[in-house]
Image: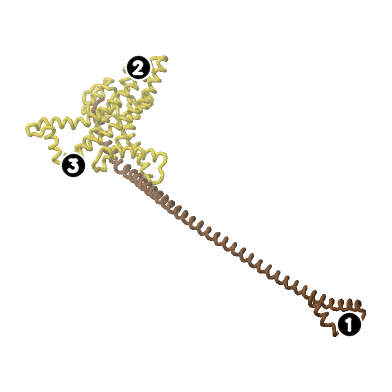
Chain colours: A yellow, B brown
Amino acid sequence: MAGENQTVSEYIVHHLTNLTYGKLPAGYERYDGSIIGDGGAWVMAHGGAEAADMGFTAIHVDSMAWSIGLGIVFSWLFYSVAKKASSGVPSGLGSAVEMIVQFVDNTVRDTFHGRNPLIAPLSLTIFVWIFLMNLMDLVPVDIVPELMMLLGVEYHKIVPSTDPNITFGMAIGVLILILYYSIKVKGFGFARELAMNPFNHPLFIPVNLFMEIVGLLAKPFSLALRLFGNMYAGEMIFILIAALFSAGVAWMAPAGILQIGWAIFHILVITLQAFIFMVLTIVYLSMAHEDH
Amino acid sequence: MNINLTLIGQVIAFFGFVWFCMKFVWPPIIAAMQEREKKIADGLAAADRASHDLELAQEKALERLKEAKHEAAGIVDSANKRASQIVEEAKTAAVTEAERVKTAARSEIEQETNRAREALRSQVAVLSLAGAEKVLGATIDQDAHADLVNKLAAEL
């Protein structure tokens, strides 16, 4: 909840600021008036302005930690099942994991017609990992930041998929795979596809190249922005509802109802977004495997 | 919302987790699932076969039952026949025996009658002689009238 000496907009901005560790340039005046010495310095950013001034040489510690942490949760969970996997009667966690695996396997079979041992595990990783990252959205927005505040950490965002770095990072991973398989499967045909589509005439090569490259880049952009947009908007609404609690005792009940309603709706959204990211990845990679 | 090194970090993490999943997670799970699928398919096939066998066995049992019934009916039939034959034989034997007993009785009666007649005859001779003696008041010559008396006795 918004602190006593915090305005609502300050509260919202605080919730949307990542814990950033980065390099400030030499001669930069920090929030407390100190000046960074020669060669710059790696420091924990204090506030959004400093984080922005760090430019590219910074890292969102919270996003990275939660993203990798949830990735480890996924890997550990599924690995513990995989170790014990047998053809006997499945039970408990085993059947839950197998249900997800079966679901992903069916989706891949329906969409991807080539033979590639990477696609199915890739899809499983994307689906479960993004689902877990999105799931963090359902943790009440104040719990983890407040706890971190008590530990002396000023900023903390626990939903990695509301950080465009994370969503674009995965989308770039997918783009790399698209390019790799396009070149591997089609070879020179891939270059011809870029140059000679949709107008099959040498005069149109520049136009074709431009259009095809935009089309190619649109794939990771759409993946990343869709996930980011949905999760960011959802998180924003959770923050607004949380801010509503501070508006007075009379607002408690409606805010509570809104909170529950939005959380229930969001269960659908987080699953759907993870699923869409997975399916589109499969579709894009399937296109990369198709030789005309 | 700045784009920074986090992006690169996430790309690396992405490939790391995908690699881990592809190497250690996916193959054993999918292998176990496929093996189970095969097991279940085998089990279903075995069940099908077993039910088919059962059907055959039932058919065979039914056939056997019918055969046995038929046989039993034959046995009962022949037993009945035999029984009536025995009864018939016994009846015949009884009739013969009765006949025999009857004949024996009859011959005995005849003998008895003959003996009685014989006795009577001898006594008639004596009585008639005594009667005649009394009537005539004289002695009858035994030798002279023996023929006459014996003729009389033979007529009785």
Estimate how packed mark 1 is, as few (under 14), some (14 to 19) or many (20 or more) residues with alpha carbons within 10 Å.
some
Q: Which residue is mark 2?
A: A6
Residue at horizontal 42 percent and vertical 39 percent from the top: A92
Q: Are marks 2 and 1 in contact (CB under 8 Å)?
A: no
Callout 2: SS? loop
* Label 2 vs label 1, nearer the camera: 1
Query: Compared to B68, does B13 lie above or below?
Result: above
Residue A177 x/y as whole percent: 22, 38
Do we see residue A148 in this rendering? no
Q: Chain of mark 3?
A: A
- The verdict on a common chain for dots 2 and 1 is no
Tag 1 secondary structure: loop
Name the N-terminal-most of marks 2 and 3: 2
User: Is residue B33 toward the left or the right of residue A213 in the image?
Assistant: right
Q: Nearer the viewer, mark 1 or mark 3?
A: 1
Q: Residue furthest bottom?
A: B143
Give the image location of residue A231, x and y in percent. Answer: 30, 26
**Could you tell me which chain the residue with mark 1 belongs to?**
B
Q: Quadrant of residue A97?
A: top left
Q: Which amino acid lies under the numbered mark 2 shown in the image of this protein?
A: Gln
**Image mark 2: chain:** A
Residue for badge 3? A185
Is residue B42 shown left or right of residue A118? right
Q: Nearer the viewer, residue B35 or B127?
A: B127
Circle on res. B140 = 1
Gap between marks 2 and 3, in whole Å? 57 Å
**Looking at the image, how many numbered discs can be counted on the residues?**
3
Q: Residue furthest right?
A: B137
Quarter occupied by residue B21: top left
Instruction: Look at the picture and state if A12 lies above or below A117.
Output: above
Q: Residues within 10 Å of mark 3 (few under 14, many from 20)?
A: some
